[in-house]
Image (cartoon, rainbow, N blue to C red):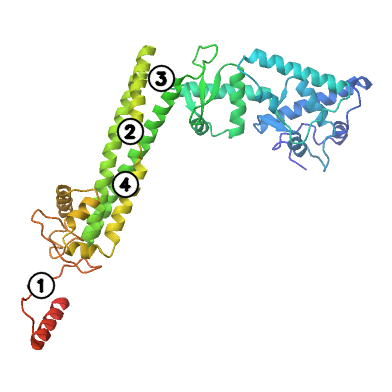
Amino acid sequence: MADSETECLPADWEDNDRMNFMFSAFPESREVNPKHWDSKLNFWSKAILENCEHHEDIFINLATLKCRFTRNSLTPLGLRIVLKQMIQQGKLVRKQDFMNFNNDGWMSWSFGLAKRSFWWGVHTVMGSDDAVNLDDKFVLVDAAKENAEWLLAKHYAGVQCETTDHVIPWNVMKMRCKKFDGETLEVLLAYLQQHGKAVVYVTPEGEKVIKFARKGEEKVTAVSDNDVDIVRLRKTVASLTLQVNKLSEEVESCRLQAAGFAKEGSRTKALKLLRRKELRKRTLDKAIADLQSFEEILHRIQNAHTDRLVIEALKAGTAALKGAHSGMTIEKVEDVIDDLNEGINESQDINSAILEGNVRRLSEASGIGPDEMEELERELESLDIGEKDSGSAAGYQYHSTSSRVAQRPGSDTELPKLPPVPSHSPDASENLSTRQKTKSLVAS
């Protein structure tokens, strides 16, 4: 048997005689025994409301109520009648009726709801079949009111600027109100819309946004083009802020990894990471510049004292949005550069390219010019591997004198300088001598 305290069951739940009466069916008509009818109706109405409040329900269905009020494997026989009576009393509203409203105001909606409840009551009295199905959802009006007012108060508490902070994307609203699932949040917003305190709008991009009435406003105004532009601007600022944080972490990570490889004596890997760091740094600088520009525009909007100034700032913001990263995103740029660098640095043909004097071409392909390559080389030297690895060379080096250094595939160790190529054909003995010298050089 369920624990009446933990499950919030009626106080006389353990009284068998009392419960046997309450679990029995209602008479066919209230006129048969009005006292017993009203007693049973009041008992179950109170039990349902208290139980739903305990479970913090905003809406309920018959199947859930039967499960919660099961006693000795029996369920109350009159719950359908109780739900119908609670609807007539205005304590419950069918969810589909609750969500079915227009923008004519809550008085119009309330009148329509009362009319539907009246005809439902007439149909019930006349015996027409208007059944309550197990899965039909019913909104608890008082619970919806209480939670919707909490939602509105939470919104007002977070408003810092009246010009920009009353229009919020749907996904942001869900993050702010994690205590509610999406369906419950829609019910609460429906209540606020019925009372003129909010309006839901879908942008041309298909994004759902919510606009709340300002404090003191009798009714929220419709979502305007300016409102949509402000949402776009704020989303851009938020997105760029995340990108700046991510790129800053990547730049620092590349630097630390390069330092680690430098200490191990792996100049090739260290220089590769420094190149990657430099490319990330370029993207980071561009993102920071864009972020500062958009933040300045948003600041101008928030501090504008007239609608004209707001519109002027929005025009500047719209133009900036169109110009920023036109046709290309940060992610696309990074992917292309990464693929290019990985292909260059991991290819087995890189050694032959170095020997053929194509270092300049490789540096240009990676997006870094000769001067910047020299700067990266100096940065690599600053990682304190110059003296430790003075006999080594990176995968490739660019110098203003266009010198080239040969390297064995898969090795970070430089071969000693080889003798000049002879201009005459060696004889057998000379050929043997040359092979022996070459072996000794390799062995060294």
Q: Position of residue 10 (x, y in %)?
A: 76, 31
- The residue at which mark 1 appears reads as 418
Query: Which amino acid, mark 3?
Result: Cys
Residues marked 3 and 2 touching at CB (< 8 Å): no
Q: Is residue 59 left or right of residue 400?
A: right
Mark sitting earlier along the chain (3/2): 3
The CA span between labels 4 and 2 is: 22 Å
10 Å neighbourhood of mark 2: few (<14), some, or many (≥20)? few
Residue 401 x %, y %: 8, 56
**Left/right of residue 324 with respect to residue 116 in the rendered view:** left
- What's the distance in space between the residues labelled 4 and 1, CA to CA? 41 Å
Q: Quadrant of the C terminus?
A: bottom left
Residue 402 quadrant: bottom left
- Secondary structure of the residue carrying tag 1 is loop
- To which residue does mark 2 refer? 324
- Indicate which disc, 1 or 2, sits on the residue closer to the N terminus: 2
Query: Disc number at residue 83?
Result: none
